[in-house]
Image (cartoon, rainbow, N blue to C red):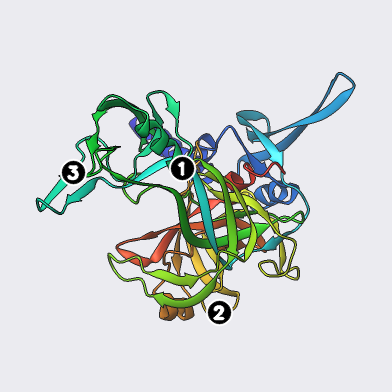
């Protein structure tokens, strides 16, 4: 009897082991409640048994008619053994149209909605003192003063010129959280009130185009323009411009030094606009010219189901021309919420390593290609190893563009 019991336990362990090795429940359960997909990806998931030998992936399309208008709601149902539902998620079908491939650096200049603290200290030359503000810190974004909205530096000047009190109430953003504080103003040598910090309302920088639609709307950078490297405010922008950017040099990435692309651009040569700054990059529209878009370079967009560990490529113009460089996707995270660190990869191409050391600042937004689809964009580099980096799924970028 004991032998039979032991044999039964062994058989159960084997069955459970085989089951869990062939069903990737964790990946299924951690999928978000909605994401993008195309028909080829659904077929590929089933053909290649990506979620295990016992899982079927079924697309359910429901037509809805309201007020003489019709629409379609799409869902994917993951079924165990073909009939036991495990999870149902809403999906949006990716457009079948191809998009133009990015990979080239761009310069941007944006006007911020508010005023950004760029230095929380002032120098008193006469008394050889450094006056440090004990409330406002570098990277804080001033939103209102005495409940008056701040759109630009002119608004701050106007309020301070008309204040009769040396104390004001200030609302500001720090690490994407809003705070209210009363601060004491200081007076300059002309007896005029000042905040006691240096502020600015516009920012310039460089990054890389990811893809461009046929109507010349674009996605770039893969991560937001932030007010400070430590203070991770995502800046609301009023408007901005895009410029053609000329690469003049490269500071190679090394351990604890992310390196950078050295580019120059001329602000009078506007090549487009910036209208949106989000966690997943910047968005806007380019002028309909050939300066930033090569109409011969086109690919389809791929959703998160297209992404798997293994060989892939990034496209970059760090050599002076647009080229493909080999990378290896180490991990494709199945995130239940959106994140700009969706893809973990390693640079394998010696050409790129010799040229840049790996991933450097300015390469953010470089398209990630797998199976002839744009499936993501470079976002971050590992400080400890510039040959490793993160990318964001194209899904999150598409969501901002109203396809």
Question: Image height check: is 387 above or below 86?
Answer: below
The numbered disc on residue 1 is: none
> Looking at the figure, which quarter contains the N terminus?
top left
- Farthest residue, direction left: 127
Residue identifier under label 1: 235
Disc 2 vs disc 3: which is toward the camera? 3
Residue at 28%, 38% in the rendered image: 192
Which one is nearer the viewer's eye here, 362 or 95? 362
Q: Quadrant of residue 83?
A: top right
Give the mark nearer the N terminus: 2 vs 3.
3
Give the mark nearer the N terminus: 1 vs 3.
3
Residue identifier under label 3: 132
The image shows residue 239 at horizontal and vertical percentages of 58, 46
Around disc 3, counting alpha carbons within 10 Å, would you say few (fewer than 14), some (14 to 19), or many (20 or more)? some
The numbered disc on residue 320 is: 2
The image shows residue 346 at horizontal and vertical percentages of 43, 65
């Amino acid at each position: 009897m004991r032998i039979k019991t032991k044999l039964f336990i062994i058989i159960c362990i084997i069955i459970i082991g085989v089951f869990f090795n062939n069903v990737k429940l964790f990946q299924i359960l951690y999928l978000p409640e909605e994401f993008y997909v195309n028909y080829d990806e659904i077929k590929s998931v089933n053909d290649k048994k990506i979620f295990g030998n016992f899982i079927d992936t079924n697309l359910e399309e429901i037509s809805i008619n309201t007020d003489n208008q019709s629409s379609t709601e799409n869902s994917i149902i993951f079924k165990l053994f073909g009939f036991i539902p495990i999870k149902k998620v809403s999906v949006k079908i990716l457009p079948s149209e191809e998009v133009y491939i990015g990979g080239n650096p761009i310069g941007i200049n944006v006007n911020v909605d508010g005023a950004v603290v760029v230095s929380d200290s002032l120098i008193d030359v006469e008394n050889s003192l450094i006056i440090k503000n004990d409330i406002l810190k570098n990277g804080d974004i001033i939103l209102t003063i005495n409940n008056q909205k701040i759109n630009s530096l002119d608004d701050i000047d106007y309020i301070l010129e008309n204040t009769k009190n040396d104390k004001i109430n200030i609302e500001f953003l720090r690490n994407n959280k809003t705070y209210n504080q009363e601060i004491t103003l200081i007076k300059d040598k002309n007896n005029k009130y000042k905040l006691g910090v240096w502020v600015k309302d516009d920012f310039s920088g460089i990054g890389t185009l990811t893809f461009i639609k046929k109507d010349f709307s674009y996605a770039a950078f893969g991560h937001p323009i932030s007010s400070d490297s430590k203070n991770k405010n995502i800046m609301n922008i009023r408007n901005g411009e895009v410029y053609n950017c000329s690469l003049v040099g490269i500071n190679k990435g090394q351990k604890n030094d992310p390196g950078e692309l050295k580019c120059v651009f001329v602000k009078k040569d506007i090549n487009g606009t910036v209208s949106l700054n989000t966690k997943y990059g910047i968005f806007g529209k380019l002028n309909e010219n050939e300066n930033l878009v090569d109409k011969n370079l086109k690919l389809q967009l791929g959703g998160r189901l297209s992404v798997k560990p293994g060989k892939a490529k990034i496209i970059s113009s760090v050599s002076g021309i647009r080229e493909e460089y080999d990378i290896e996707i180490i991990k494709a995270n199945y995130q239940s919420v959106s994140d700009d660190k969706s893809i973990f990869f390693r640079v394998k191409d010696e050409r790129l390593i010799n040229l840049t050391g790996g991933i450097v600042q300015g390469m953010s937004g470089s398209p990630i290609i797998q199976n002839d689809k744009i499936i993501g964009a470079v976002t971050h580099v590992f400080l400890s190893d510039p040959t490793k980096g993160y990318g964001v799924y194209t899904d999150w970028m598409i969501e901002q563009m109203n396809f």
